[in-house]
Amino acid sequence: MKVNQAFPSKFIKAADLQGKEYTLTIAMVKLEDVGAEGSPEEKPVLYFAGRTKGVVLNRTNAGTISHRYGEETDDWVNKEVIIYPDTVMFQGKLVDCIRMRVPATAAAADDAIPF
């Protein structure tokens, strides 16, 4: 048995991505209690079209999305993001995490390129 199967989560974890990146469409952003039992903590959770689990947004991922799509999370609906597993230093240890980036825009017409 895998440990992730023994302790299921309603949120997507880095291990759920199985080392791959996915391009997903944002369905909604919802403020939810994501704290441990007895320790309420509200954070925004990003949900995707056709998926049941959401991703708890941290400042880094929220900043990445808002840089491209704006500060208003309602404006993110029907926009695409790429989610992928990564690692980050946390309390002196390298730990798995989920990172996001926004897909590049379509190439501009040749006459619009400024160089």
Image (tube, grey):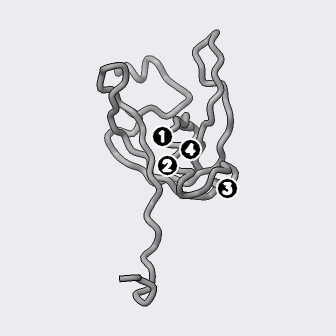
Q: Nearer the viewer, mark 4 or mark 3?
A: 3
Tags 2 and 3 in contact by the CB under 8 Å rule? no
Q: Amino acid at mark 4?
A: Arg
Q: Position of residue 18 (x, y in %)?
A: 34, 38
Check disc 4: other Cα within 10 Å, few if <14, some if 14-19, many if 20+: few
Question: Mark 3 or mark 4, which is nearer the start of the sequence?
Answer: 4
Q: Which label sits on residue 64?
A: 2
User: Going from the N terminus, do you reach mark 4 or mark 2 first?
Assistant: 4
Query: Quadrant location of residue 53?
Result: top right
Amino acid tagged 3: Asp
The amino acid type, in three-letter code, at marker 1 is Thr
Identified at 53% across, 58% down, the residue is 68
- Label ID, residue 60: 1
Q: First in sequence, mark 1 or 3: give its number.
A: 1
Nearer the observer: mark 4 or 2; the answer is 2
Please, what secondary structure does the residue beneath circle 2 have?
A: helix
**Which circle's residue, 2 or 3, is located before the other in the chain?**
2
**Is residue 4 toward the left or the right of residue 75 in the image?**
left
Find the distance from the CA under tag 2 to the CA under tag 3. Answer: 14 Å
Circle 3 sits on which residue?
75
Residue 108 location, x and y as percent?
Answer: 45, 80
The residue located at (43%, 64%) in the rendering is 104
Residue 111 rendering spot, x and y as whole percentages: 43, 90
Residue occupied by mark 4? 51
Q: Earlier in the sequence, mark 1 or mark 4?
A: 4
